[in-house]
Image: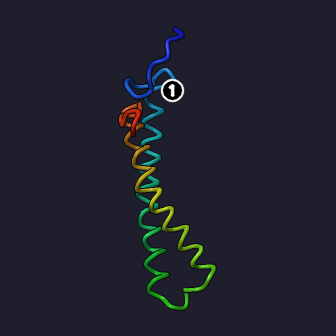
Amino acid sequence: TGVVRSPFDYPQYYLAEPWKYSVLAAYMFMLILLGLPINFMTLYVTIQHKKLRTPLNYILLNLAFANHFMILCGFTVTLYTSLHGYFIFGQTG
């Protein structure tokens, strides 16, 4: 119809069918379930074993920490947004 609604007020189902948003939500949930324990184990094992404290492993540790932060902050927002079909946190979110 040519009418573009605000992405902060209404579900954006003209961009994709609702089932596609559900598939995205399921995919993000799977990434959260797999990513959190893997990154936690990487951090835990590297901190516990002194032999693993090498410069290269510090880079990997940094990546695991950053990925952990991304999972907690980014993936959960994407999951919540895709469940509702639009960005529910508004323009300031």
Residue shown at the point (44%, 74%) measured from the top left: 41
In the foreground, 68 or 93: 93
- Which three-letter amino acid code belongs to the residue tagged 1? Ala
Q: Is residue 78 left or right of residue 55?
A: left
Residue shown at the point (47%, 25%) measured from the top left: 17
Percent from the top left, x then y, of residue 20? 48, 33
In the foreground, 14 or 22: 14
Percent from the top left, x then y, of residue 91? 41, 33
In the foreground, 84 or 70: 70
Q: Residue furthest bottom?
A: 51
Q: Is residue 64 left or right of residue 80?
A: right
Q: Is residue 54 left or right of residue 4?
A: right
Q: From what the image shows, is residue 58 above or below residue 91?
A: below
Percent from the top left, x then y, of residue 67? 50, 61
User: Label 1 crowding class (10 Å Cα cut-off): few <14, some 14-19, many 20+?
Assistant: few
Residue shown at the point (44%, 52%) measured from the top left: 30
Colour scheme: rainbow
Q: Residue furthest right?
A: 56
Residue shown at the point (46%, 61%) measured from the top left: 35
Quadrant holding the C terminus: top left
Percent from the top left, x then y, of residue 62? 54, 71
- Mark 1 lies on residue: 16
